[in-house]
Image (cartoon, rainbow, N blue to C red):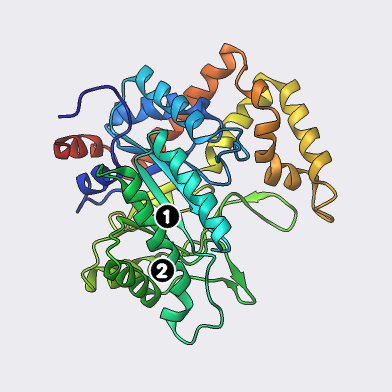
Amino acid sequence: MKQNDYGPISGSSIFSGISGQKAIIMAANTRITTVAKGIFRAAKETDSAVFMELARSECDLKGGYTGLTPKDFADKINDAAKEVEFDIWALHADHITIKKGDPVEIDQTRQLIDAQVSAGYTSFAIDASHLFNFEGKNVREELEQNIQVTTELAKYIKSRMKGKDFGLEVEVGEIGRKDGHGLVLTTPEEAVEFINALYSNGVHPHVLAIANGSTHGHIYDDKGNVVEQLSIDIPQTKAVAKALRDNNLKIGIAQHGITGTPRELINQHFPKGDIIKGNVGTFWQDVVFNTLKVYEPALYQDIQEWTLEKYRAANPGKKDKQIIDGNCKFAIKEFFKELYAVEEDTEDAIQAMAYAESLVFFRAFSSYGSASLVRKTIP
Ligand SMILES: [Zn+2]
C-alpha cells in the first residue's frame, strides 16, 4: 500500500488497475486550476480514478498559454489533491508535441521532460504525429519519423524516471487534421504498424491517441455558434481497437477532444474499454469563464475585450463571439493574477460547477469504482 501523501501515482498503475473493465478514465486539462478541487471531490465521492494534465502548448518552461510551468502545475494540483484527500490520480504530460523533429526541437523537448520529471509527473504523452511523411510509399515509410522520435523520447523518459513506473501515451494520426475530403482518420493498419514498430524498438505504451473524427476545442456552425460535436467515428474507433487486439498489442485508445460531445452519446455509444482514457480540456475553461460572466462581470469584460483586440485582425470575416470563444484561452496567462484572485464566492461556484460536471463525466465514462480497482493493484 502506498503511503497516503495524496501525491500522484503512476499512470501505468491506473491503466493496469482498470484493465479489462468497460471504463474510460477522465483526463482533465485544467488550464485554470481552480476547477481541480471540484474534480477531485467528485472523483473521491464516486471512487473514480482520474488524470490531471496539461499539453506542451498549455504548460511549458515559459508557462505556455496558461502561465503555468510544469512545477507550478504540479504544485497546484498536489495542493488540491491534499486538501480533498484524494489518492488515485496521475499527473500527466499531455501532447509533448514535436512538430519538426530537428535536433534543436528534440533538445528543447528533453529539457521540458526534465522539468516534468523533476516536478513529479507520473505519465507522459509523446505526440510526434505531425511527423507524417506524405511522400512515403507505404504505411511504414509514412510513419517512420514518428516511430523514431517517439522511440527516442520514450527511452529518454525511461532513463530520467530511473526505474520508477510511469504511464506512456503515444499518437498516430494528427487529431483534427483535414485534407480536401474532411477529417483524416487513423486506419487500423496504421495503428498496428505503429505499435508493432514501437514494440520492436522496446517501447510498450499503455495508450494510443488516434485521429478518429474529433477536434480540439469547440466546433461552430456557419454563424459562429458553438455546436455539439457528433463527428467521432465510433465504428472506425472500434475497428482500430479490434485490429490492435487481434495483433496481440495490449494497448487502449485515448480519446482526445471530447468537449462538445453530448454525454448521453458517450454514455450509450462510446466503446468503453476500447477507449480507456478520455481527455476533456476546453470544457473546464468554459466552467470558469461561464461562472465569471455572472460572478465577475468586469473581469470577464476585460478578458473579452483583450481577446478581441488581440485576435480580431488575424480572423477576418469571423463573428466576434467566435473570435473570443476560440482565443480566450490565450487570455489566461495575461489575466493570470486576476483569475487566481477571484472572490471566494466565485471560487466556490467554480468548484461546485466542476464537481457537478465531473459527476456527469464519471457516470458517462463508467469510471465509478475504478479508483478502488487501481488501489488494489498498487504494491
Ligand atoms: Zn489532445
Q: Quick check: 216 left or right of 267? A: right
Asked whether disc 2 touches disc 1, contact meaning CB atoms under 8 Å apart, the reply is no
Residue 28 visible in the shown view: no
Residue located beneath label 1 in the image = 255
Q: Position of residue 331 (x, y in %)?
A: 70, 35
353 versus 368 height, above or below: above
Q: Is residue 349 above or below residue 189?
A: above
Quarter occupied by the C terminus: top left
Farthest-out residue, top: 344
At 54% from the left edge and 55% from the top edge, which residue is drawn? 229
How crowded is the residue under tag 2: few (<14 C-alpha within 10 Å), some, or many (20+)? many
x, y percentage for residue 305?
A: 80, 33
Of residues 78 and 285, the one drawn nearer to the viewer in this rendering: 78
Give percent across and percent down for residue 277. 36, 50
Q: Distance between the residues labelled 2 and 1?
A: 20 Å
Which residue sits at x=15%, y=29%? 1
Pointer 2 residue: 147
Indicate which label's residue lies in the foreground, 2 or 1. 2
